[in-house]
Each structure stands twice: as C-alpha cells, then as structure tokens.
Image (cartoon, rainbow, N blue to C red):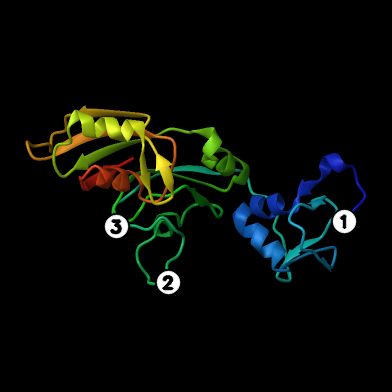
Amino acid sequence: MSENNSENKLRLNKLIADSGLASRRHADRMIEEGQVTVNGKRVYEVGIKVDPAHDSVMVNGKPLKKPLENIYILFNKPRGVLTTMEDPLDRPTIAEYLEGVPGRVFPVGRLDWDSEGLLLLTNDGDFANKVTRPKAEVTKTYMVKVDGQPSPDDIKKLLRGVSIVGGRVAAKHIEKIKRQEGSDQYDWYKMVITEGKNRQIRQMFEKIGFDVMKLQR
C-alpha cells in the first residue's frame, strides 16, 4: 500500500463495495478468501486501507472499477418475487425489474416471497449498514391482513413482546384500520416495528394464534 496522505485512504472493503462489485459483507469474504490483490500482493486483512488514486486493486485478476455515484431506489416489490438478485431455481427476482439501473445495487433488508411493498435498494454500503443496524431502530410500517379478529389482549401481547425464531421482538405501534376489502371475518392492522427478522410479523401473529393473509410495507 502506498505511503500517501492517510486522509486519502479508504478501507479496502469499502472501496470494493463503492465500486458496485459487491456488498460490504461480500467484499469481506472476497478479501478473506484471497481474491483481492493490492499492488500485486494478495491481501487477507479486511481492515487494511488503500489509496484509490495510487494503489492498484484487482479482484480475481481484474482491475477494480472506479467508484460509482451513490444510487438510491424505492421499489414497490410485488408478491411472488424474491428479494435477491439471482435464484438457482430460476424463480422471479427483483433483478428482473432493475435492468435499466446504471450500476449494481443491493436490497437494504428484505421482504419475503409472499410480502409486497416498499423495498430500498442502493450501492451505498455505509448507508445500508447504518439503517439496518439494530441500534438505529429505523421504523418500518406494515399493513397486515389477518385471518380472524384478534382481541385487545392479543394485540397487547404483541406490544409487550413475543419470542420468535431469532429472538424476542415487540411492535412499537399497532392500530386497527379499515380497508375496502375488509370483512367481519378478517381484520386489517397498521403495525410498526424496528427490527427486521425473517418473517417477523407473520411469526408474531402466529404466536397469538392468527395467520397473516396479506402483508404490505
């Protein structure tokens, strides 16, 4: 690595992520697996710093592209689409909707196959890490249609917290709402959470005995 002013240096994993080649986490794996060289020397330390203007960084023998401008996309994910860029089973993925994007982006968080609504995509690894950190407590609001009519006590349980696969979670806010497609058999709720565990809302309602029929963020 060059001896230039340290103010010009960036962490190697950030430089790779900023180039649009991979997410920060994937960049870490690439470095640890020896896929990255700096000035012809293979490196394995995730935390090393390089000078983009003077150091030659190559990944799997190919020069690293210059960092892209930051891209932020608000995407309305349909139901029946995977929150991933590729799928070995050839199922529909969000990549099919991003062909015109001038650079590689990654989803911030996820929505499962049966869920729909707001999904944020970006190539800004720092931003993605900031908003997905548990300590950030970024709120996420969902419209939830449940199979049945939970009692006030059931809803209080979700506010107090329940244990699901992945840990204990609680809703920050829940209120019953009216929708045109509502009925006497199904209730709609507006629900706010700060976590983002896999199938969290579905698991929470399952804990109080109800299935989620529709989930929109």
Check residue 88 in the rendering and tell me which mark sits there, or answer none.
Answer: 2
Which numbered disc flags the more N-terminal residue, 2 or 1?
1
State the residue at coordinates (46%, 60%).
85
Q: Are marks 1 and 3 in contact (CB under 8 Å)?
A: no
Dot 1: element:
loop
Residue at numbered disc 1: 1
Q: Quadrant of residue 184?
A: top left
Circle 2: residue type: Pro
Residue 37: percent from left, percent from top: 78, 65
Q: Is residue 24 something one can see in this rendering?
A: yes
Check residue 121 in the rendering and tell me which mark sits there, or answer none.
Answer: none
Circle 1: residue type: Met
Residue 190: percent from left, percent from top: 27, 32
Could you classify mark 2 by the number of other residues whose Cα lies within 10 Å: few (under 14), some (14-19), or many (20 or more)?
Answer: few
Dot 3: element:
loop
- 13 versus 145 height, above or below: below
Residue at numbered disc 3: 80
State the residue at coordinates (52%, 52%).
106
